[in-house]
Amino acid sequence: MEDDATMLSTKRRNYSKEVRQIAKEDAVRARDMLSQYFLASRSSESGAPLPSSLPDRFILLPDQRPPASSVAVSLPVIDLSRGRDEVINHGVSQQTMREMEEVCEEFFRLPAADKTALYSEDRFKRNRLFSGTIYGDRYWRDCLRLACAFPVGDTKNDWPDKPQSLREVIEKFIMPTRGVAMELLRLLSEGMGLRPDYFEGDLSGGDVVIHVNHYPPCPDPSLTLGLPPHCDRNLITLLLPGTVNGLQVVYKGEWINIITNGMLKSIEHRAVANSALARTSVAAFIMPAADSLIGPAEEFVSKDNPPRYRPAIFGEFIR
């Protein structure tokens, strides 16, 4: 019979093999990321033309595809040119937003070798790069996910070190962006009759999570989507939409829906692809603390308006 030390050593070797195998599989998938696929197809080294048809794995069923005409869209199309859901005079400088857009676009132009180590299909990993083909999904998107505690502090050391300015630019972007989100929450609180600081503390004390969504040019946008219809599962979301049009999100997250007992709705939204231009957008999610209890505020519950949602621990819900 093996002694405890031998058994432990064997388990460690087997575990190391499993980790190496997962890393190898992730590296293979990373080479198939949409952005890298299209960069390679355009490069003079490969000489391969841009595909004229959409790969079969991205073709959605007819009832899941975007409509032929915007008139038929049942999901809310947020037209930011009307200012309806646009935040202006917010204090985040034009230079900061422009630098954020530029460094994110530069990231997706990096060679595959500089991005492979970041690729992971572990959805609980705080910082990772993944594609729209994971978990059986077939959406036309690459995504860089970055999480940071607030204040940022040493968190940025876990972010990619390329491009060289990425860490500095993202930290510079996150600081005022979170400030805008908190001011919006204070205004919402006052407008709903809550105390102004209702959403401070644990309800907004989790990570600030950044999703850099990259949608490469698509051979046939009518057959696929960049993101499926969904509602955000965080407190509030702010979007830096980029310069290429697509369906945009509004800023009310699902947890506001719960806290207000249905008064504020989390709006369903999705993203579409573009046949000619790549689009890169940045979503900043303000998260509750993992151990915070989320439930309807007492101010929105009465005999005539009973709770519509059961209280839940945020960390358990998102798992």
Image (cartoon, rainbow, N blue to C red):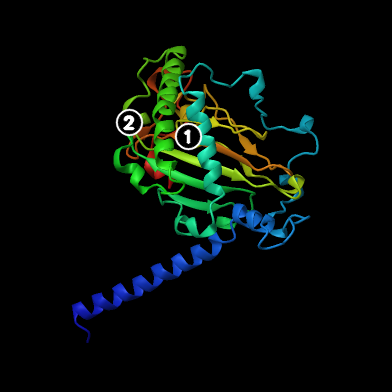
Name the quarter where the N terminus is drawn.
bottom left
Secondary structure at badge 2 equals helix
Crowd tier of the residue under label 1, counting other residues whose Cα lies within 10 Å: few below 14, some 14–19, many 20 or above: many
Mark 2 belongs to which amino acid? Asp
The quarter holding residue 40 reads bottom right
Q: CA distance from mark 2 to mark 1?
A: 18 Å
Looking at the image, which is closer to me, 182 or 253? 182
Relative horizontal placement of residue 7, taking residue 247 as reference (left or right):
left
Residue 5 screen position, x and y as percent: 19, 78
Q: Which mark is residue 284?
A: 1
From what the image shows, is residue 82 above or below residue 309? Answer: above
Which numbered disc flags the more N-terminal residue, 2 or 1? Answer: 2
Residue type, mark 1 in image: Ala
133 versus 216 height, above or below: below
Pinpoint residue 31: horizontal percent, then vertical percent.
56, 61
Q: Looking at the rendered structure, which numbered label has been put on residue 202?
A: 2
Q: Position of residue 265 (x, y in %)?
A: 55, 26
